[in-house]
Image (tube, rainbow, N blue to C red):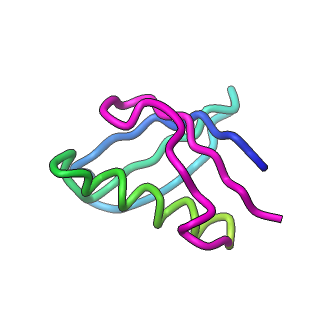
Amino acid sequence: MTTLQVKVKPNSRVSTLEQGSDGLWLARLKSPPVDGKANAELVTLIAGHFGCRKAAVTIRSGAAGRMKLVRIDAP
């Protein structure tokens, strides 16, 4: 189990996930922050980056904000 602190920037031109030198992850998402679209894209992006299933990725806190705690339940 891993917990990431992620700062989200929606409405970007490309979807990327990168880790900063301070340990904070920055996720640039194409999706707008409407109807959970950005959260769904974030889960997909993190699952693809860490090579796990989308079901193993959950947003623990900050679902309505820019700063999120994301938990990965992968072996």
At a point 24% along the width and 57% down the height, the residue shown is 31
Residue 6 relative to residue 23: left or right: left
Q: How many marks?
A: 0
Q: Is residue 60 above or below residue 2?
A: above
Tell whether position 5 is magenta: no
Q: Which of 12 and 48 lies nearest the eye of the viewer?
A: 48
For the C terminus, the quadrant is bottom right
Residue 62 relative to residue 17: left or right: left
At a point 78% along the width and 49% down the height, the residue shown is 1
Residue 31 relative to residue 62: left or right: left
Figure quadrant of residue 57:
bottom right
Q: Which of 21 and 52 lies nearest the eye of the viewer?
A: 52
Figure quadrant of residue 29:
bottom left
**In the displayed image of the protein, which residue is found farthest to the right?**
75
Q: Is residue 63 above or below residue 48?
A: above
Tell whether position 67 is magenta: yes
Q: Residue 63, position in %: x, y?
A: 37, 37
Q: Is residue 19 above or below residue 57?
A: above
Q: Which contiguous range is marked in magenta?
A: 52-75
Q: Residue 48, position in %: x, y?
A: 57, 71
Q: Residue 13, position in %: x, y?
A: 26, 58
At a point 69% along the width and 40% down the height, the residue shown is 3
Residue 34 relative to residue 49: left or right: left
Q: Residue 50, position in %: x, y?
A: 68, 64
At a point 61% along the width and 32% down the height, the residue shown is 24
